[in-house]
Amino acid sequence: MADKLPLPLIDHAEGQLFLTQAFNIIVEEVLCKGTDVKQKVCHEWKEPEELAELLDLELREGGEGQQKLLQRVRDVAKYSIKTSHPRFFNQQFAGVDYHALAGRFLTETLNTNLFTYEVAPVFVLMEMEVLRGLRQLVGWTEGDGIFCPGGSTSNIYAMNLARYQLFPEVKSQGLYGLPRLAIFSSPEVRMAVQRCMSDYTVERSRMIPEDLDQKIELSKSQGAVPFLVSCTSGTTVQGAFDPLDRIADVCDKHKLWMHVDAAWGGSVLFSKQHRHLMKGADRANSVAWNPHKMLVAGLQCSALLLKDTTNLLKRCHSANATYLFQQDKFYDVNLDIGDKSVQCSRKVDCLKLWLMWKAVGSSGLAERVDKAFVHVRYLVEQMKKRDGFHLLREPEFVNVCFWFIPPSLRGKEGNADYQDRLAKVAPTIKERMMKQGTMMVGYQPLGNKVNFFRVIVFSPLVSQKDLDFFLNEIERLGDDL
Amino acid sequence: MADKLPLPLIDHAEGQLFLTQAFNIIVEEVLCKGTDVKQKVCHEWKEPEELAELLDLELREGGEGQQKLLQRVRDVAKYSIKTSHPRFFNQQFAGVDYHALAGRFLTETLNTNLFTYEVAPVFVLMEMEVLRGLRQLVGWTEGDGIFCPGGSTSNIYAMNLARYQLFPEVKSQGLYGLPRLAIFSSPEVRMAVQRCMSDYTVERSRMIPEDLDQKIELSKSQGAVPFLVSCTSGTTVQGAFDPLDRIADVCDKHKLWMHVDAAWGGSVLFSKQHRHLMKGADRANSVAWNPHKMLVAGLQCSALLLKDTTNLLKRCHSANATYLFQQDKFYDVNLDIGDKSVQCSRKVDCLKLWLMWKAVGSSGLAERVDKAFVHVRYLVEQMKKRDGFHLLREPEFVNVCFWFIPPSLRGKEGNADYQDRLAKVAPTIKERMMKQGTMMVGYQPLGNKVNFFRVIVFSPLVSQKDLDFFLNEIERLGDDL
Ligand SMILES: Cc1ncc(COP(=O)(O)O)c(C=O)c1O
Ligand SMILES: Cc1ncc(COP(=O)(O)O)c(C=O)c1O
């Protein structure tokens, strides 16, 4: 008997043909052209109004044919920034890893959710294993953890956990009635974690252990309850590492939760040569580490690692939703890890990292980290040899912060308008750079320091030529200023 | 002169070959076999220990060859649940849309971040347009919004915003010193939003407007400050819709922020026939709506829509990170939308929805919603014709909650052990179902109701045959119980 009801609305043959054609466009436009130094990072700079019109973004009542849709795929690719390009130095992500990318395609197609073992058997086990591997690098043989949709969320989780450990009653009774809770973090991390902290009194302390200790005493004497110190391994702008071992002493003394925001710097743990930067990390209670940054796993991939072995994560976050976490299942319900998260749906973020790690091994990831340091060393040496480049400070990590001093300003440091004029250099160079599309690097002011460039060098695609190009291009764009 | 420095660590030709081969495996194993009713939803049930061993999850020092890695891609596909299969009825996601999937592959490959117009020109504009399209369906010609990594996060954002509007000083001074804040939500949503609410006093109120009004008065008289009512359009288990229009009257009266959690039900707004279920949504302050659920956009895709036109989102969440949001840029910095989010990195979640919407139009999405209601109607009628199926109540939406009463229990409702025995039926059927792998559907208890099945029918791949199969299969698996 024929179906009386509406038939399936998807035609698989047509759909798979479309997907294959789109895949070919993606390979050609994004992966081939998008990583080719003869092509641009920004194909063609467009003002928003013009771009919106070119893309014909409006959503309408009727659908469109396959050819038109393929053209849309081409247009989106064309006008997007090529973040994998070897001359994209703008953010804490760059480059491409093909194994990770294959893992991402597979993740998208399998489209599952880290609720339960039942619905994501492979990924529940895989996430546990990847977290175990990351924890091992921190120096922990046991513990817990979870992947979060970004480092900010990982940091928020750490605060939630520290608070819950101290005041488990918040979960049922809310925050009202708690004492004034205080968190300590260094001034430079304001930008990375400030938005997560608005629930608390935040004390800024340079992470000089003696200073931190004093600030904690002061805070207590003013009636607050300090409960967490957030240190940073690899600050966002300057790439600085806090002295974890000595901060751990202070946390021990005051019995505070020690959190390490290693979203950016965590990857040094792969490198025998550079892991000393995080010495003492194993003494922390929690570490946030984003493989979507330096490891090129692709957005999003952020791990919160915990030393805890008391199921704190689940106790703190569980809602015991009966429609997901039935206790009368036929398998070990401890594998239903969904209840560790504040999220309900949670994307699979482990497969891309796992597949990449399998492909190149810990040694391959270490090699990438080491290569980045070598490149940074080279770049810094070259800067010192050229007239126009002035470092803010010697880099500890893969962020190189510098001013470009155009010829007209050299030797004019004493002039009254020097800082004002210097402040305008980076924005002007940046505008020219975007409009010509040859490369991308970011700038910012910091405290009383006027606009400087922050070039971040770690993409596995970068070669010496790209670094030379970078320096020449800054000079070319700024020499008349 | 040859490079002295380490060379790029990625071989594009080799990488692209791997990616293409992986793509072919994905199409064959996940998209062809994974949607074929002659194949299983769960290929082969494995106990965790056995599966971990089969997958060889351990991460090691050295890397692996391409053939071995392709086998890993095959294994991950093989042992994963086929959530696109027409007989996967287990969650609030299912099916596949090829245009959305192409959008997801493109998103992954472009690997950018919704920080700024500079780094994501296409997606900043696209996100604005998609949000505009969704808001229009709510009934708003202006407003604001943002994509979040899931409905829980969207709900948390609404709470943040409502609180900030009332007490803007929380942002700089923390929560200490605020009065006891109270939120109102219906008992069934406990599961979906409870985890977001632990900061507040949560009053459970059946969303009967008179009852809600009384509860609010009571809460005030006890010294609390009610600030938000969270109603639900499409509850997780039963698919119930709260009477928004009448709740809006109560919110107006008490000047409370009205939030509509339409994570699940929002998609009815596409349908002329069914949008009445959300009548009054335009009177809310915020609506959370997850296209990753009923619209098959793929995980993750959740929109928080706001009526606000005062830039509340940015004022509440901005950290003004100077390294991202320089004010001296050469374009309109209002397009640097990253500061609207608590997240720092934020994945692009709009492209998949945009491309799918372009492909089938609003009319095509409406057709999918209408088809789902027709299928549910059919399923319910068939259940009524068969002896063993007992509905919890008439479905309002695409969730059908029912007990299967096996022959041995029929007519035994009066027996003392009836409920105990009935409670064991669903878990037993579920275990058999998983081990045979033919389909997937979830069960749960709710309040004093013992374990019942919740079958969710909306995948565009489903046909009448799959619904008939569903009923027959439940009977086959449960008839001897
Ligand atoms: C030190 C540090 N912590 C946290 C973050 C936030 O991580 P995410 O961008 O994944 O939210 C960043 C990066 O932006 C960072 O540099
Ligand atoms: C009514 C309702 N609200 C919120 C959520 C949470 O959405 P998400 O799973 O995207 O976090 C769900 C689904 O789980 C839901 O059904």
Image (cartoon, coloured by chain):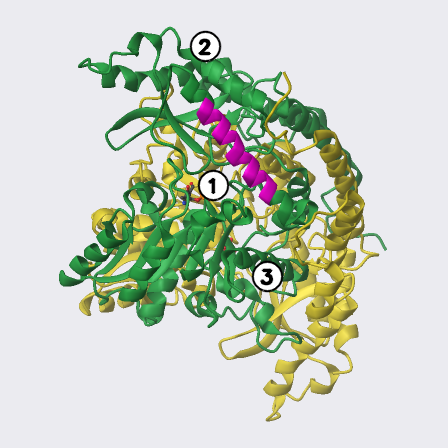
Chain colours: A green, B yellow
Give the overall secondary structure of the magenta segment: helix
Q: Is residue A5 left or right of residue B210?
A: right
**Dot 3 corresponds to which residue?**
A128
Q: Is residue A359 left or right of residue A465?
A: right
Q: The disc labelled 3 sits on which kind of residue?
A: Met
How far across and how far down the image is residue A324, in percent?
A: 56, 67
In the picture, which quadrant includes the C terminus of chain B?
A: bottom right
* Residue A476: mark in rendering: 2
**Dot 1 corresponds to which residue?**
B346
How far across and how far down the image is residue B155, in percent?
A: 41, 53
In which chain is the residue bearing label 3? A
The Cα–Cα distance between marks 1 and 2, rounded to whole angstroms, is 33 Å
Q: Is residue B121 above or below residue A238?
A: above
> Do the residues bearing badges 3 and 2 touch, measured as CB atoms within 8 Å?
no
Q: Is residue A403 left or right of residue A24?
A: left
Q: Nearer the viewer, mark 3 or mark 1?
A: 3
In which chain is the residue bearing label 1? B
How far across and how far down the image is residue A3, in percent?
A: 79, 52
- Residue at disc 2, secondary structure: helix
The local crowd at label 2, few if under 14, some if 14 to 19, many if 20 or more residues have their Cα within 10 Å, is few
Tell if the residue under mark 3 belongs to the same chain as the one under mark 1.
Answer: no
Q: Is residue B195 above or below residue A12?
A: below
The stretch drawn in magenta includes residue A369: yes
The outermost residue toward the right is A1
The outermost residue toward the bottom is B416
Mark 1 beta carbon near ligand 1 (under 8 Å):
yes
